[in-house]
Image: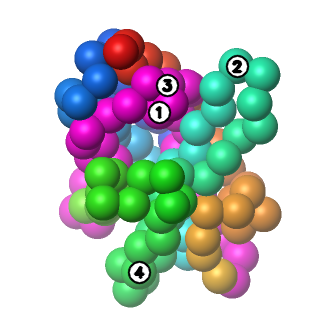
Amino acid sequence: QVQLVESGGGSVQAGGSLRLSCAASAYTYSSRCMGWFRQAPGKEREGVAAITTGGGNTYYADSVKGRFTISKDNAVNTLTLQMNSLKPDDTGMYYCAAGASLGCGTRTYYFDAWGQGTQVTVSS
């Protein structure tokens, strides 16, 4: 059964940091691509970062390059998103995702399994 559980969200002031984690079932972690998405109220879901589970290639949205880092720990089936220099525009619900199709990136069509999300709020 596919299962993704996010944690680590919260409230922080602009310039602060947060670390999101996603615990994945072994089946999910065998997916080719895993990533993080976010959705602010009234906006479409957007890809933030993605990583290939095999080679560790990473992909980032332009808006987070240099501030966010995606990583994976295969030993414990965990996906992590380190977020630094946070801005109010980073506010939203953050979702962990996994996909088994060929290819990887920050587009939603690479993914077919989603977590329930964790809220991130950045105040100015």
Report, in whole angstroms, how far the alpha carbon at label 2 lies from the one at label 1: 12 Å
Expressed as whole percent of the image width and height from the top left, the position of residue 35 reads 52, 57
Identify residue for label 3: 91
Q: Find disc 4 in the rendering and name its residue.
A: 57
For the record, the magenta segment spans 74-102
Q: Are the residues tagged 3 and 4 within 8 Å (C-beta)?
A: no
- Tell me which label, 2 or 1, sits earlier in the chain: 2
- Which residue is at 66% across, 71% downward? 100
The residues bearing labels 3 and 2 have C-alpha atoms spaced at a distance of 9 Å
- Residue 16: percent from left, percent from top: 21, 28
> Residue under circle 1?
90
Type of amino acid at the residue the image marks with label 3: Thr
Horizontal placement of 50 versus 8: left or right? right
For numbered disc 4, what is the local secondary structure? loop
Q: Earlier in the sequence, mark 4 or mark 2?
A: 2
Residue at 43 percent of width and 17 percent of height: 121
Which residue is denoted by mark 2 in the rendering? 41
In this view of the protein, which residue sits in the foreground, 23 or 60?
Answer: 60
- SS at badge 1: helix
Q: In x, y percent, where is residue 15?
A: 23, 30
Relative to 54, say whether 14 is above or below: above
From the viewer's perspective, is 42 left or right of 36? right
Residue 122, located in which quarter of the rendered image?
top left
Could you say which quadrant of the image residue 9 lies in?
Answer: top left
Badge 2 crowding class, 10 Å Cα cut-off, few under 14, some 14 to 19, many 20 or more, is few
Task: Tell whether label 1 touches label 3 (CB within 8 Å).
Answer: yes
Residue lying at 49% horizontally and 25% vertically, measured from the top left: 91
Asked if residue 7 shows in the view, the reply is no
Q: Percent from the top left, x then y, of residue 59?
A: 48, 70
Q: Compared to 34, does 14 lie above or below?
A: above
Q: Is residue 82 visible?
A: yes
The residue nearer to you, when weighing 54 against 10, is 10
